[in-house]
Amino acid sequence: MKITCLGTGTSTGVPEIGCVCEVCTSDDPRDKRLRTSVVVETEGKRLLLDCGPDFRQQMINNRIYHLDAVLISHEHYDHVGGLDDLRPFSYEKGLDVYAEDDVVDAIRTRMPYVFREHKFQGIPNLELHAIDNKPFTAAGISVTPIRLMHGCLPIFGFRIANMAYLTDLKNIPEEELAKLNDLDVLILDALRKNEHPTHESLPEALSLIERVCPKEAYLLHMSHRIGLHAQVEKELPPHVHLTYDGLTINC
Ligand SMILES: [Zn+2]
Ligand SMILES: [Zn+2]
Ligand SMILES: [Zn+2]
């Protein structure tokens, strides 16, 4: 399996518009973070996890010309804002998009022109599939949803074979923890160093990693308040890393 981190920043991206802090003005390319999205390649298929407003740039930067399915964690703009740009990936046949039923409703409301009976020429050809908290297959690949709490909003993380992608979580219900056993790679939210009401802080992410014991853990969805990539990376345990845009992980 090959995992590519297309975007590793929080909803504002890094740099933040108008901010002149040392992270936002850093010359290190690893301190420039597009909105969070990951692509997983396994068994000859390519699955996109979240499709935010930087999706178009991410496809160009990473020279990705084909997708087999899309999984959406939740309805926030930084995870769905790029859905219209799926057009070139759905010209030949409809592209399957998997999300929880209320997220499916939110996507329909956000993009009514895509789902009208009489379609405007050139719109994305998306096949929405409502999922619940049970394993499903996307492009023939088995996916296990994981219930996460994003503050008081229930959302989904996803496990594919021995990797799991948990973005935008503050808490994980105890009964879901068993789904994170025996992971090779855990990718999870770590917004910043200090606490936040709807996202894990760095210390909270590290304590979840300690409980779940993946072989390797990678942090994403960072804001500028995480600090400089080069500096924070040195402070982490050896099997924990900050992601950066364009990072590939093989497992
Ligand atoms: Zn987010
Ligand atoms: Zn800043
Ligand atoms: Zn969110």
Image (tube, grey):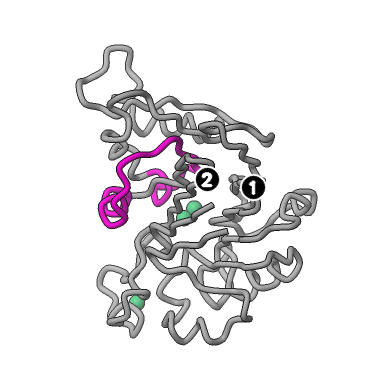
* Numbered badge on residue 42: 2
Residue, x 32% and y 49% (percent of image)?
A: 55
Quarter of the picture holding the C terminus: bottom right
Q: Is residue 157 above or below residue 225?
A: above
* Numbered badge on residue 161: 1
Residue type, label 2 = Thr
Q: Say left or right for 165 vs 109.
A: right
Q: Is residue 234 above or below residue 48?
A: below
Q: Which residues are magenta?
A: 54-80
Question: Is 73 inside the magenta-drawn segment?
Answer: yes
Question: Neighbour class for label 1 at 10 Å: few (<14), some, many (≥20)?
Answer: some
**Residue 176 pos. (x, y %):** 75, 49
**Residue 148 pos. (x, y %):** 64, 50
Q: CA distance from mark 2 to mark 1?
A: 9 Å
- Image quadrant in which you'd find residue 165: bottom right
* Numbered badge on residue 62: none
Residue, x 66% and y 46% (percent of image)?
A: 146
Tell me, yes or no, whether the two marked residues, 2 and 1, touch with CB atoms within 8 Å.
Answer: yes
Residue, x 26% and y 35% (percent of image)?
A: 88
Q: Earlier in the sequence, mark 2 or mark 1?
A: 2
Q: Secondary structure at mark 2?
A: strand
Question: Neighbour class for label 2 at 10 Å: few (<14), some, many (≥20)?
Answer: some
**Residue 237 pos. (x, y %):** 63, 81
Q: Is residue 131 above or below residue 190?
A: above
In the image, the residue with mark 1 has its CB under 8 Å from the nearest atom of ligand 1:
no
Residue type, label 1 = Ala
Q: Nearer the viewer, residue 122 or 169?
A: 122
**Residue 23 pos. (x, y %):** 36, 80
Q: Say left or right for 106 vs 141.
A: left
Q: Is residue 40 above or below residue 197?
A: above
Question: Is 150 inside the magenta-drawn segment?
Answer: no
Q: Secondary structure at mark 1?
A: loop
